[in-house]
Image (cartoon, rainbow, N blue to C red):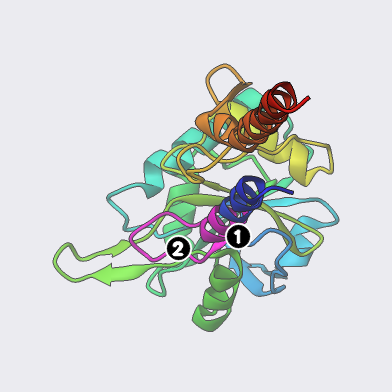
Amino acid sequence: MSAWASLAVVMCIATAAKAQSPDPRDTPPDEERLLNAAVPDIWLTTTSGMRVSLSQIASGKPILLTFVFTRCVGVCSPFLMTWRAADRAVGRQDKYRRVVLSFDPRDTTADLLVLRQHLALKEHDDWTLAIGDPDDVRRLAAAIGFWWDWDQSRQQFDHPAMLAGIRDGRVVRLLVGGSVTSARLDELVREVSGEFVPSYPLPGRVPFRCVQFDAATGRMTLDWGFGLLLVPVFTTSIATFAMFAAGARSRRRHP
């Protein structure tokens, strides 16, 4: 392998490692860093007053889980509404369980019951809105890379919006962003259900790459990293051609 090719491989590894490193709290959680991480089977109290474990809620099915707090005036409600709308559009209601868990110790099951009515989930048993012991909730949040900080000036929690796909007690995929589209939800549901879903580097996350994924068209296109990988090929070809050309000139001068 040439020096240029070795350098290209090192750059790929370095940037991939950088993309998988823990993100600081001023950036969204990394969707790829915690894949296959174990999730604690904590106990929760639902809006019906039942105390159940996460595995009992799953009942052998995958779980999509998100964290919210009912006093949120920011992303929580819009995020839940887009998830609700995308859930209707995807139409795979029997494939997985949905869990909305409050991380705010002030929240009660009565607060979550109001939220349940707001989301029009009264007749939907596959949606579980619940609270839990604060220490257990923090353990679960840490397992999927979720965090929250109290903002004293706004009297609100600062936190990301994310959906965790969990199967058999392990993280399958994280979906991070302020809204849930039906296309991404369908992909997430298929993956937690055990179907093969092609993976791709997230746009803007890996600066050195060979291909770029366009979420709008669902197509892969060549990126500038592919051209850089061709540099060793052209360099070696030019050097080889120059070497043979020099040898030919030498033979003509000294037959």
Left or right, 125 with reference to 122: right
**How far from the left and from the top, in percent, is residue 215?**
55, 25
Instruction: Indicate whether residue 253 is drawn in magenta.
Output: no
Query: Furthest-left residue in view?
Result: 153
**Which quadrant of the view contains residue 149?**
bottom left
Q: Judge whether 20 appears above or below 1 on screen.
A: below
Per the image, the residue denoted by label 1 is 33
**How far from the left and from the top, in percent, is residue 1?**
74, 49
**How far from the left and from the top, in percent, is residue 95?**
79, 39
Residue at the image position 75 percent from the left and 63 percent from the top: 170
Q: CA distance from mark 2 to mark 1?
A: 9 Å
Circle 2: element type = loop
Residue 99 visible from this viewpoint: no
Query: Furthest-front residue in view?
Result: 254
Per the image, the residue denoted by label 2 is 23
Circle 1: element type = loop
Asked whether 26 or 187 is in front, the reply is 26
Asked whether 104 or 186 is in front, the reply is 186
Identity of the amino acid at label 2?
Answer: Asp
Count neighbours of disc 1 (C-alpha within 10 A) and say few if under 14, some if 14 to 19, many if 20 or more.
some
Give the magenta-colored segment's residue range. Answer: 13-30
